[in-house]
Image (cartoon, grey):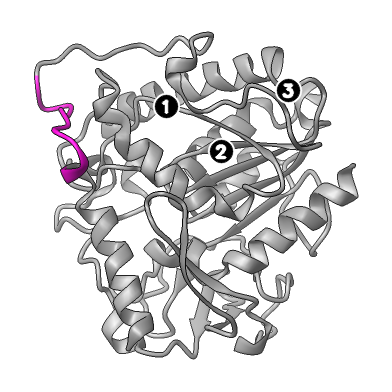
Amino acid sequence: MKKLRMLTFLLTIVLTAGVFCGCKTSNETETSKEPDYSNDEFWVSKPETAEYEADTFFILPTVNLKNTTPGNETLVSEEDNIRFVKTLAMESQIMANLTNIYSPYYRQATMGCYLDSDGIVDYEVSGSEEMKEYMDLAYSDIREAWIYYIENCNEKRPVVLFGYSQGAEMILKLLAEFGDDSEYSDMIVASYVIGMPVTEDYLKANPKLKMAEGEDDTGVIISFNAYDERANLAGQKEYSINPLNWTTDGAVAAKSTNKGYVVTDTDGNITEEIPCYCGAYIDTETGKLIVTDIEGQDELYNSSGLFAAGDYHLYDLMFFHRNLEENIEKRINKKI
């Protein structure tokens, strides 16, 4: 059960991220610091020189899973932001050898903005009227960081938009505002919206945005959320693509097509890699991605306690790491 031990190890790191520092939360009285993105202090990653022909604008997920009171994180000190740095180190390896990575600190909505009355993540909670002010504040920072990046850092290079979890929600907000503006959209390779559903309502509200239909189309949204076959798949239909065969129909991708599940530590070092880890298919009725053939699946089932049974949210990137890495390179090469 070495695989399971490594997954549990990573999950423990994420769930106990607060122990990295004596972090203040939105429940404390410290005044929130408004980011000034002309100051490098407010970038988790901002290369001094461009090493690659393309960039990634990377929006981080919720980095403190322990703050269950609705609100916003404060960015009051460098110590408080160690969790951002470690989370980026873990997750950015997918594109680290392909692109220049620009990732802003931002006043994230807290984990409490995503929890239902039972303390379980419900993706609709953050879209409620009660949470609007917190989500709007988080997005206002991302908006400012994006504009600063385009005007001062991009230098006409193609850019991948990449967001996971709350980061994916911020990408969707960014696309809703700028995705139809040729000044911005022409340079976007593709938008990876992982761990946050793209719904029928969203696409109806933004009809000029397009979902990916294959492995190398550009200017599109790539999205999926990993679920178990036994999960409750009720709710609004999602629009997904299978990261193993890059189709949107119900074709089953065998685990042999999985090029590598990858675990990284908080310094970005790969600690374990397993090819052929799991298979997957799209449930055509709900649009959700269903993972199959996972060794130790019963023990992983709802292992975090934060997500409904069968929701593998915390593993979305790990399960398909090498397939995502290869796909980003393919789409960049098509754009260049």
The magenta stretch spans which residues? 19-28
The residue that mark 1 highlights is 105
The residue lying at 34 percent from left, 43 percent from top is 62
The residue that mark 3 highlights is 154
Direction from residue 301 to residue 167 in the image, left or right: right
Q: Considering depth in this image, is 205 or 271 the residue closer to the camera?
A: 271
**What is the x, y in percent for residue 308?**
28, 68
Q: Amino acid at mark 2?
A: Phe
Q: Quadrant of the C terminus?
A: top right
State how many labels appear. 3
Does 38 lie within the magenta span?
no
Mark positioned earlier in the residue sequence (1 or 3): 1
Q: Amino acid at mark 1?
A: Tyr
Question: Height in image: 330 above or below 108?
Answer: below
Mark positioned earlier in the residue sequence (2 or 1): 2
Q: Considering depth in this image, is 299 or 68 the residue closer to the camera?
A: 299
Question: Height in image: 308 above or below 201?
Answer: below
Mark 3 nearby-residue class (10 Å; few <14, some 14–19, many ≥20): many
Q: Is residue 326 visible?
A: yes
Q: Secondary structure at mark 1?
A: loop
Q: Which mark is residue 170?
A: none
Mark 2 nearby-residue class (10 Å; few <14, some 14–19, many ≥20): many
Q: Which mark is residue 58?
A: 2
The residue lying at 57 percent from left, 50 percent from top is 193
Q: Is residue 307 visible?
A: no
**What is the x, y in percent for residue 296?**
35, 89
Direction from residue 330 to residue 167 in the image, left or right: left
Q: Considering depth in this image, is 202 or 304 the residue closer to the camera?
A: 304
The residue lying at 74 percent from left, 72 percent from top is 247
Q: CA distance from mark 2 to mark 1?
A: 10 Å
Q: Which residue is the extreme one toward the left?
A: 28
